[in-house]
Image: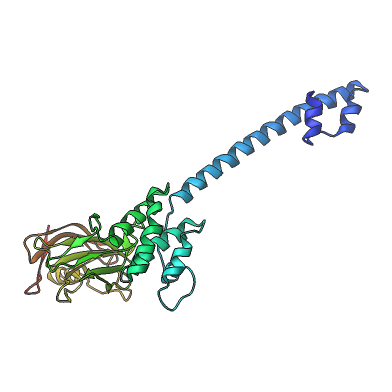
Amino acid sequence: MKKEELYKEIGLIDESLIEAAGQSGIGRRKKRISKKWVSVALCLMIFSSVSTASLAAYYKKQNAELYIRYLTAEDMELVPATEYDADKFLRALKSDNDEYVYIAINRLIESFNDQKMRDKALTEIKPFIQSDNEKIADAATFAVDILSQSYQSQYVYKMADGSIIFTLFNNYSDYGSQNVLWRIKNNMLEEHFSFSKPSMYIKEIIPSPNQKLVAIVTCSNKSEFVEVMNIEEGMGSPELVESSRVKYGAQKSLDTWIRIDHENYSYVNNIWWKDNDILEFEGNLSYNDTETIESVIVSYEFRHKVMKVNEK
């Protein structure tokens, strides 16, 4: 096919212009000019197609990563519901929406106490271990570990009383996991404790050496918080980051106003158990709306509720 026919075929040059082009020198000049601009137009079309394809590939990659910043209670229900509905989440596993699938896999762990539903969920979730979506594959691996009662996952924490604790939606956000602590004791699953705002994510769980106590680091996108819990006895410490900020501020005559939203704009750099009862951590404590940052070492003795805060 001649170039003129190709241009005419794709609609970039008018047939009457081609006919007129051969009738005069001016026409021939118009023809040459037309061809020149047609060539430019073709180049632009090719560039546009490549750019569109590149953008599509980019967004496909972004979508494949399944980025979730925060899951609300409504998000985790998929549709409005007044009580847990395992069948709804089983149906959601067939969705083309990766976020729905991811939510369904995590929520189906809640069917643990129903043996029949647990077996059904286990069967339906297993194939997702091979998913190309890493977040879905990881969620499926964890769900299978819990539902099969294997308890070998790195996200399962075994306590001295024989119970295990864990979170769902592990590391779903850059900030951490769902802010609910789940517990299995005597082969029964329960929602053990739920953290309120601004503790929107569970960032880290650190059992004491004898597994009787557990330190839990939670966070918002502005602050970090630390609490110590005795899971078996149902006892907990005060929130330690804000407590240490107020205590150290009083020691150094710093402004210790507490924000009404309970954000502390302070962070924990490191955390460890000195022994089975004393937790220590490094903290950056914020004062005067972050004008002043104090680096400290915090020590908290759970049994006697004694806190020490010293300059680092």
**Lateral position of residue 25 relative to residue 116, left or right:** right
Q: Which residue lies furthest to the right in this view?
A: 23
Q: In the image shown, does 203 or 91 lie closer to the viewer?
A: 91
Q: Report which quarter residue 257 is drawn in.
A: bottom left
Q: Which residue lies furthest to the bottom in this view?
A: 82
In the rendered image, the quadrant that contains the C terminus is bottom left
Q: In the image shown, does 223 or 66 lie closer to the viewer?
A: 66
List x then y, in percent, for residue 296: 15, 60
Q: Report which quarter residue 142 is drawn in.
A: bottom left
List x then y, in percent, for residue 196: 31, 73
List x then y, in percent, for residue 248: 15, 68
Residue 127 appears in the figure: yes
**Lateral position of residue 126 relative to residue 192, left or right:** right
List x then y, in percent, for residue 272: 13, 58
Residue 106 appears in the figure: no
Q: Report which quarter residue 11 is drawn in.
A: top right
Name the residue: 39% across, 61% down: 105
The number of numbered discs placed on residues in the rendered structure image is 0
Name the residue: 22% across, 55% down: 152
In the rendered image, the quadrant that contains the N terminus is top right
| Up/down of 50 relative to 202, above or below | above
Which color mode does the image show? rainbow
Q: In the image shown, does 290 or 301 lie closer to the viewer?
A: 301
**Lateral position of residue 191 relative to residue 54, left or right:** left
Q: Residue furthest front?
A: 116
Q: Which residue lies furthest to the top in this view?
A: 25
